[in-house]
Image (cartoon, rainbow, N blue to C red):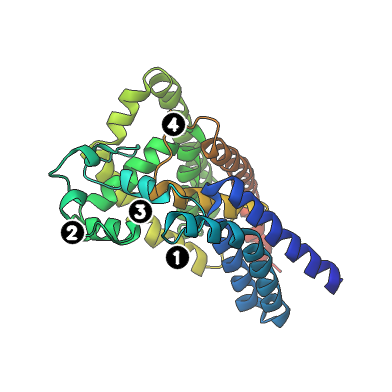
């Protein structure tokens, strides 16, 4: 079994490196996989996991390193995967950016990057310097990137809604044991989901640009920031009360989800330009999460009173 596990880890590293060479947008997947192995080690304190991390990273490096060395020698600068990373990174993080690819700064002599005095520096440092001088731009642009990439996906909003309601359910756990309150809460969830579906079908499918304009407004951004604050308070409370996460999916789908989300927030995922690329992958992952989450959520709400009675009368 130990040899099989080692072979599987090596194959995973080779496959991950090969996929990354073919699809540069998987750039964060190796980091996330290594982080997941690290989490398993922290949780189980099993030294075998350290060996797996080393095998994975070695197999991955042997796959990617030859190309990285070749590209770096040819370009005269350090290239890890893509030779276009610098341009894409700066073209999606500038004063013209609105969640899409915006290279207009290159034609504007007064643009920030044309006057930052860092022409020889890495794109990472130049973008960091841009946000250092324009801190208010960061949350607004992150929201616009998210909306532009995944805002038109119905499952995005349903998943966020159910996640929030499920967290509230745990906070109100004792009150929800009463049948009336429990069914009222379930009805609210159904109604809010129906409203999202109706709005998505009526407005979004009819006028994507209008929908994007609404979500990119100052009011929407403020509501988004309030939602993030609420989730930052509710979700940790939810976890600290030993509540079970209803979202269950293969680990690789979870890692793919976070990989593409990070790529979206760092660059962009314009669904009008990339309709068949990782926006569709994210749609599949979100559908997987949402279906399982809602089914588990419903089962929990139905079984809640019986579980409460069993705890009171062991």
State the mark number for residue 237.
1
**Disc nearer the start of the sequence (3/2):** 2
According to the image, label 4 marks what residue? 152
Q: Mark 4 packing: few (<14 Cα in 10 Å), some, or many (20+)?
A: some
Q: Mark 1 packing: few (<14 Cα in 10 Å), some, or many (20+)?
A: some
State the mark number for residue 228.
3
**Disc nearer the start of the sequence (4/3):** 4
Q: Mark 3 packing: few (<14 Cα in 10 Å), some, or many (20+)?
A: few
Depth check, front residue: 22 or 28: 22
Residue drawn at x 36%, y 46% is 87
Asked if labels 1 and 4 touch by Cβ distance under 8 angstroms, the answer is no
Q: Nearer the viewer, mark 3 or mark 2?
A: 2
Depth check, front residue: 241 or 279: 279
Q: How far apart are labels 3 and 2 at the CA level?
A: 35 Å
Q: How far apart are labels 2 and 4 at the CA level?
A: 39 Å
Depth check, front residue: 97 or 243: 97
Can residue 67 be seen? yes
Q: Nearer the viewer, mark 4 or mark 1?
A: 4
According to the image, label 2 marks what residue? 117
**Disc nearer the start of the sequence (2/4):** 2
**Disc nearer the start of the sequence (1/3):** 3
Quadrant hosting residue 245: bottom right
State the mark number for residue 254.
none
Asked if labels 3 and 1 touch by Cβ distance under 8 angstroms, the answer is no
Q: How far apart are labels 2 and 1 at the CA level?
A: 46 Å
């Amino acid at each position: 079994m130990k040899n099989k596990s080692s072979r599987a880890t090596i194959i995973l590293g080779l496959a991950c490196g090969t996929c990354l060479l073919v699809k540069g947008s998987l750039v964060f997947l190796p980091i996330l996989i290594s982080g997941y192995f690290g989490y398993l080690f922290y949780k189980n304190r099993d030294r075998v996991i350290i060996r797996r991390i080393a095998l994975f990273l070695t197999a991955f490096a042997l796959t990617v390193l030859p190309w990285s060395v070749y590209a770096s020698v040819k370009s005269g600068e350090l290239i890890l995967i893509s030779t276009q990373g610098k341009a894409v990174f700066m073209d999606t993080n500038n004063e013209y950016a609105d969640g899409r690819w915006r290279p207009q700064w290159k034609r504007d002599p007064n643009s920030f990057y044309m006057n930052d005095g860092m022409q020889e520096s890495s794109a990472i440092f130049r973008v960091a310097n841009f946000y250092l001088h324009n801190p208010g731009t960061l949350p607004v642009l992150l929201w616009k990137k998210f909306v532009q990439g995944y805002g038109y996906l119905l499952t995005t909003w349903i998943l966020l809604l159910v996640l929030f309601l499920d967290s509230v359910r745990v906070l109100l756990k004792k009150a929800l044991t009463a049948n009336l309150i429990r069914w009222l809460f379930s009805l609210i969830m159904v109604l809010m989901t129906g409203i999202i579906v109706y709005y998505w079908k009526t407005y979004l499918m009819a006028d994507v640009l209008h929908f994007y304009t609404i979500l990119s407004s100052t009011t929407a951004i403020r509501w988004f920031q309030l939602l993030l604050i609420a989730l930052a308070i509710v979700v940790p409370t939810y976890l600290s009360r030993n509540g079970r996460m209803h979202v269950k999916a293969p680990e690789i789908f979870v890692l793919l989800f976070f990989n593409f989300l990070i790529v979206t927030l760092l660059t962009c995922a314009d669904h009008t330009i990339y309709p068949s690329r990782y926006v569709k992958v994210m749609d599949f992952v979100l559908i997987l999460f949402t279906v399982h989450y809602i089914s588990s959520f419903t089962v929990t709400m139905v079984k809640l009173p019986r579980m409460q009675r069993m705890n009171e009368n062991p």
